[in-house]
Image (cartoon, rainbow, N blue to C red):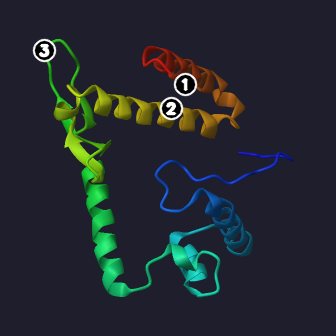
Amino acid sequence: MKVDNRKKIYKAREGAPFRQEEAEIIGKVLEEIESKKGSITPEDFVEYSRNPNSPTHHLFEWDDKKASTLYRIQQARDIINHIEIEIIADDLKPFRIRAFQPVVIKKGKGRVYYPVGKIVPYEEYALQVVKRLQNMLNSIALELEGFKKYKWLVDALRKLSERIKIRIGE
């Protein structure tokens, strides 16, 4: 996507593992890596951040024992996020959906996963899922905005997002 002369301000997405104020610093570091290497890989970002004087050093866990546990937790998230169930109903074409949905509960546990069937009866949790999916629609529309060929898709996604917003009362 061509940005022309528009001003870019880096922002943290919801749920980011860093503070909003750090987004601009991280964005500039990633730009620096890209300008030197021609692209960015996670490995390049880790290597850049390895230096204790790097502005992004604190974002990583450098204690290997702690890092291995955190990595396994991230692997678990990735596995849970990629489990789907196929729904087969007599009157519908079979379809697949994410089997376990992440929701934020008020009991202090932060984000947890529930089977999709358990979320449906709880309006608060169902609304979280709908809002997350609406945010995804908005993100897709934004990412496609620079591609003039897909303006029709951007328009359709925005209309759908607006209809969702109206239906959920926002």
Q: Residue 84 carries which label?
A: none
User: How dense is the environment of label 3, judged by Cα within 10 Å: few (below 14), some, or many (20 and up)?
Assistant: few
Compare marks 3 and 1 and give the one earlier in the sequence. 3
Of 64 and 122, which appears nearest the observer?
A: 122
**Quick one: SS at disc 2?**
helix
Of 43 and 164, which appears nearest the observer?
A: 164
Q: Residue 137 carries which label?
A: 2
Q: Against 32, is 150 above or below? A: above
Q: Would you say 43 lies left or right of 122 here?
A: right
The kind of residue on which mark 2 rests is: Leu
Q: Are marks 3 and 1 in contact (CB under 8 Å)?
A: no
The residue sitting at the top extreme is 91
Residue 84: image quadrant is top left
- Where residue 65 appears, x then y in whole percent? 31, 85
User: How dense is the environment of label 2, judged by Cα within 10 Å: few (below 14), some, or many (20 and up)?
Assistant: some
Observer-side mark, 3 or 1, equals 1
Residue 118 visible in the displayed image: yes
User: Looking at the rendering, in which quadrant would you find the N terminus?
Assistant: top right
The kind of residue on which mark 1 rests is: Leu
Q: Do the residues labelled 2 and 1 touch (CB within 8 Å)?
A: yes
State the residue position of label 3: 90
Q: Against 9, is 137 above or below? A: above
Compare marks 2 and 1 and give the one earlier in the sequence. 2
- Where residue 39 appears, x then y in whole percent? 64, 67
Q: Which residue is drawn at 63% across and 52% down?
A: 11
**Quick one: SS at disc 1?**
helix
State the residue position of label 1: 157
User: How far is disc 3 from disc 2 in space, using C-alphas?
Assistant: 29 Å
Q: Would you say 151 lies left or right of 140 here?
A: right
